[in-house]
Amino acid sequence: QLRQRLESELEDIRGAGTWKSERVIASRQGPHLQLAGGGAGIINFCANNYLGLSSHPEVIRAAVDALEKFGAGLSSVRFICGTQSIHKDLEEKIACFHQREDAILYASCFDANAGIFEALLSPEDAVLSDELNHASIIDGIRLCKANKYRYKHMDMQDLEAKLKEAQKHRLRLVATDGAFSMDGDIAPLREICQLAQKYDALVFIDECHATGFLGPNGRGTDELLGVMDKVTIINSTLGKALGGAAGGYTTGPKPLIDLLRQRSRPYLFSNSLPPAVVGCASKALDLLMESNAIAQSMAAKTQRFRSKMTAAGFTISGKDHPICPVMLGDARLASVMAEDMLKRGIYVIGFSYPVVPKGKARIRVQISAVHSDEDIDRCVEAFTEVGRKHGALP
Ligand code: PLP
């Protein structure tokens, strides 16, 4: 009976055209991939490997060293016998990188988002969340008992109206992605912080698509927009720009981090981060704190792609962000164009409803510091050819 029910549910997913298949990669993560069962030399434009650190030799070396010195894993949660010196060092490094008082590690940023709202907010409090926030923020908010307000995407009038309504509560927390992963657009943090000040609210940002590369020193959206001293809480991932292995964290005021160590369920009841993963992230942060050359190189390549694609006649959503959504509108067009791009050796993914709103299908291109100018140009050429073939360009 269960098998039948599951089969019918799977059929419904296929029928709705929302089936997600997984392409198998036979090489390391990087700008050039080999796909299992053939496809070599594919140029990859769909990883969150913004700084190209996922296969950086020093990052890999640091992982091997940590594995050898500290073992495969802790077989324990942090507060029983799962804290090693490298966990404390990495937490300190993260806090220093973001110029915050303290930091706490999680197995993922999904866990960091799942663990913060319930630990911090109670039924007397309120949380105000951008309607397009990442699923993990939405789930984290679902788990807490605070009063919930959802404001329209980056709409400051709506946020202000909701903040006025929320004045009756003890504490208000505005929660937003720093950069939104489907559109490559950046939250108006200056305005959000001004409103937060006016209505006595705290600001929380999820920096998964910003940490390591946005802002003059790659600190993130708060640095980019000059509000590092106004954002109270940052959650981010070690699984994208910072080496790409896994892991997430919260950084902010020390008493908050202390409280999370006592109360945050994904932290309390889940195994410690494996040493090799800690080693990767720690080395990635060292590289970024030494120099911002990698981030600058990524910014230059992003600029090259965005300007060449715009000149070719495409509409690219967002601004200056390595997430470059090529807006196509029609879901079928996005899907056939992505398939045709792969035939030309360019790996990109089409997104359509329900992942993005109806009529706003797109192919999302993600630029990395390790793409060469030639890689970028080949991608633009392929888009131009495929776009003409399918009528997306005149
Ligand atoms: N928040 C945002 C905005 C994300 O894009 C992601 C990853 O997709 C996460 C949180 C979850 O991060 P992690 O992969 O570390 O769980």
Image (spheres, rainbow, N blue to C red):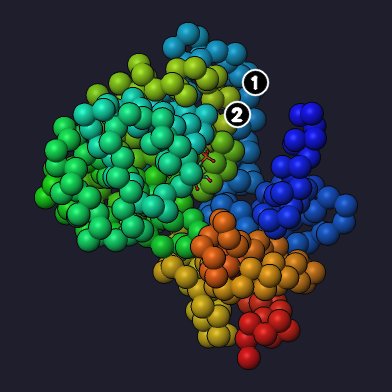
Q: Residue furthest front?
A: 1
* Vertical position of residue 98 compared to residue 359: above or below: above
Identify which residue, 318 or 288, lies in the foreground. Answer: 318
Q: Is residue 27 left or right of residue 223?
A: right
Q: Where, by quadrant of the figure, is residue 262 drawn? A: top left
Name the secondary structure under disc 2. Answer: helix
Q: How far across and how far down the image is residue 314, in percent?
A: 55, 80
Identify which residue, 166 or 76, lies in the foreground. Answer: 166
Identify which residue, 200 or 345, lies in the foreground. Answer: 200
Identify residue for label 1.
Answer: 72
Q: How far across and how far down the image is residue 272, in percent?
A: 52, 21
Q: Residue furthest left?
A: 198
What is the crowding at mark 2: few (fewer than 14 residues within 10 Å), some, or many (at least 20)?
A: many
Please report the residue visible at 43 percent of the width from the left and 21 percent of the height from the top: 265
- Mark 2 or 1 closer to N-term? 1
The amino acid on which the numbered mark 2 sits, given as a three-letter code, is Ala
Q: Is residue 248 left or right of residue 148?
A: right
Q: How far across and how far down the image is residue 304, in percent?
A: 52, 75
Identify residue for label 2.
Answer: 276
Please report the residue visible at 55 percent of the width from the left and 13 percent of the height from the top: 76
Any part of residue 179 in sight:
yes
